[in-house]
Image: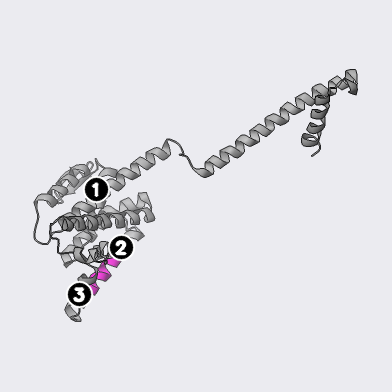
Amino acid sequence: MASRQPGYELRFGPSLVPVVKNLMIANAIVFVLQFLTKNVLKSVPLELYFGLTSDLVLSGWVWQLLSYGFLHGSFMHILFNMLALWMFGSELAEIWGERSFLKFYLLTMLSGGLVTLLAHVLGVPQGTVVGASGAIYGLLVAFAFTWPNRELLFMLIFPIKAKYFIIIIMLMVLFVQGEGVAVFAHLGGAVGGFLLIKVFSFWKAKSQSGPGWSFQRYLQKRRFQRYQEEMNHRENAKKRVDELLEKISSNGMDSLSRSEKKFLNEASKKYFNK
């Protein structure tokens, strides 16, 4: 339910866009499977195969760079991620379109996984990483860039502009690190979101300034140029034929030179016998 007081809005209750709803359902289903596998069936936890373990990724389990984002470590973990997905993702999905939103979501999740992997390669142990937080941080960055001056209620008390809100969140990621917090996945998602927004802004600005070069447009332009040249040739030929016919009318056929007779014959066949 949005606040009716001017200057800020309480972000509870944006319309639930289908792509966001489907992502929330997928995360919920996977979380239930995690719980059943670990606590009821007492079998190998899903985190082993689908959580992001850098050593396994380097040995070929590359699907973990995306699958980790559908697993969560606790009920509170998935609850806050899904609330953020709903509150910040729904409005972005409405203006971007569902396919573009899904691509953005998965790419920021991938960037979170890649930065986690990079940190491991550089010697910073990461353990097994799970959670949609990488993609969520990408959405937060996108929201702040899309509506930088929109005021939100921070901690449901303090009105703060979105551009400052994301700065506070990023500082919390950097300096308020707790045990089990996937800092590099969060940073990777945020950086990925920032880069994607910049690329999209550049592409949009370029497309609005006029269409770029393409082979199809080149061929269309060449066909139009040839058509214009043909029309010009036809117009010039008609003018020349009229002059020669006037000459014949005044002085007879013998007054034409050999080249003029040849031109009249060729023009007659090419332009006037169709």
Q: Counting residues from the N terminus, which is met first, the one under dot 3 or under dot 1?
A: 3
**At 64% across and 33% down in the image, what residue appears?**
228
Quarter occupied by residue 253 = top right
Residue 219 in view here: yes
- Residue 245 located left or right of residue 217: right
Q: What element carries label 2?
A: helix
Quarter occupied by residue 102 = bottom left
Q: Nearer the viewer, residue 100 or 230?
A: 230
- Residue 249 located left or right of residue 227: right
Q: Counting residues from the N terminus, which is met first, the one under dot 2 or under dot 3?
A: 2
The range drawn in magenta is: 23-34
Amino acid type indicated by mark 1: Val
* Gap between marks 3 and 1 measured at Cα: 32 Å
Q: Counting residues from the N terminus, which is met first, the one under dot 2 or under dot 1?
A: 2
**At 42% across and 35% down in the image, what residue appears?**
209
The residue that disc 3 covers is 45
* Gap between marks 2 and 3 measured at Cα: 21 Å
* Gap between marks 2 and 1 measured at Cα: 19 Å
Image x and y of residue 51, in percent: 21, 67
The residue that disc 2 covers is 23
Q: Do the residues labelled 3 and 1 touch (CB within 8 Å)?
A: no
Q: Nearer the viewer, residue 151 or 102?
A: 102
Label 1 Cα crowd, 10 Å radius (few <14 / some 14-19 / many 20+): many
The residue that disc 1 covers is 141
Q: Is mark 1 on a helix, strand or loop?
A: helix
Image x and y of residue 119, in percent: 17, 55
Nearer to us: label 3 or label 1:
3
